[in-house]
Image: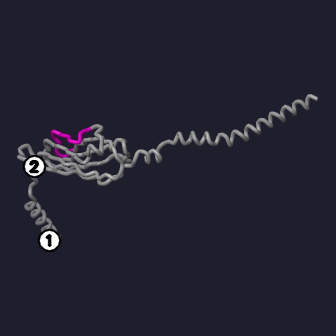
Amino acid sequence: MKTQIFYLAIATLLVTICAEEEPEAAKLLVSKHILNKYLVENMDIIVKYTVYNVGNVAALEVEITDNSFHPDHFAHVSGELNARIDRVPPNSNVSHTVVVRPRKFGYFNFTSAEILYRRTEDAPRLQVAVSSAPGEGLIVSYRDYAKKFSSHVVDWLAFAVMTLPPLAIPFALWYSSKSKYEKLSKTSKKH
């Protein structure tokens, strides 16, 4: 028992001596998420960037730059693809959202965004970080999406119009014979 306590004390002492004190600096972790369940041509795609400061000092002059949404392939709807955040406090996070609209359908590689920031107030140069990359996603054509998810009102109206003659013709024949026999029945009861 005494030897175990002795070894535990030595291990604690070594960890304390060998452990370097963490420098006072900001450290950013950045995630990039596509929030839509379905990616559809000519419909909005919501992209959320979350900046986590796991450091012990505020990150300064944080710049998020995302060049993965080329203007030939995407229309910018709202938010900024090149955003600037003055400061991210230590042990906290900040979110930024962008809305883009794809102009074409097909497979698209959603790459990472680049983040520049100052780790400390007196840092001479900017630190570079890269966000997570959502990866490749399929942007479905609007026509295929509408086939699968629309309410098909026009289809149901066409179905109703097409089923009307097979139902209306037998009903009309039945109704005319019914009224004919009712007239005969009324006239025979009078005599």
Work out which residue is located at the far right of the displayed protein and give it. 191
Q: Which mark is residue 64?
A: none
Q: Are marks 2 and 1 in contact (CB under 8 Å)?
A: no
Residue at the (87%, 33%) spot, across then down: 184
Q: Is residue 4 above or below residue 144?
A: below
Residue at the (47%, 48%) spot, across then down: 148
Residue at the (31%, 47%) spot, across then down: 34
Q: Which mark is residue 3?
A: 1
Give percent across and percent down for residue 122. 5, 44
Closest to the observer: 53 or 137?
A: 137
Closest to the observer: 88 or 72?
A: 72
Give percent across and percent down for residue 9. 12, 64
Where does the C terminus fall, quadrant-wise?
top right
Label tally: 2
**Is residue 175 found left or right of 3 in the rendered image?**
right
Give percent across and percent down for residue 177. 80, 37
Closest to the observer: 44 or 88?
A: 44
Q: Is residue 169 magenta?
A: no
Give percent across and percent down for residue 31. 25, 49
Closest to the observer: 82 or 120?
A: 82
Q: Say whether disc 2 or disc 1 marks the residue closer to the N-terminus.
A: 1
- Residue at image mark 2: 24
Of the two numbered discs 2 and 1 in the rendering, the one whose residue sits closer to the viewer: 2
Residue 58's quadrant in the figure? top left
Residue at the (32%, 43%) spot, across then down: 46
The region drawn magenta spans 79-92
**Is residue 178 found left or right of 47 in the rendered image?**
right
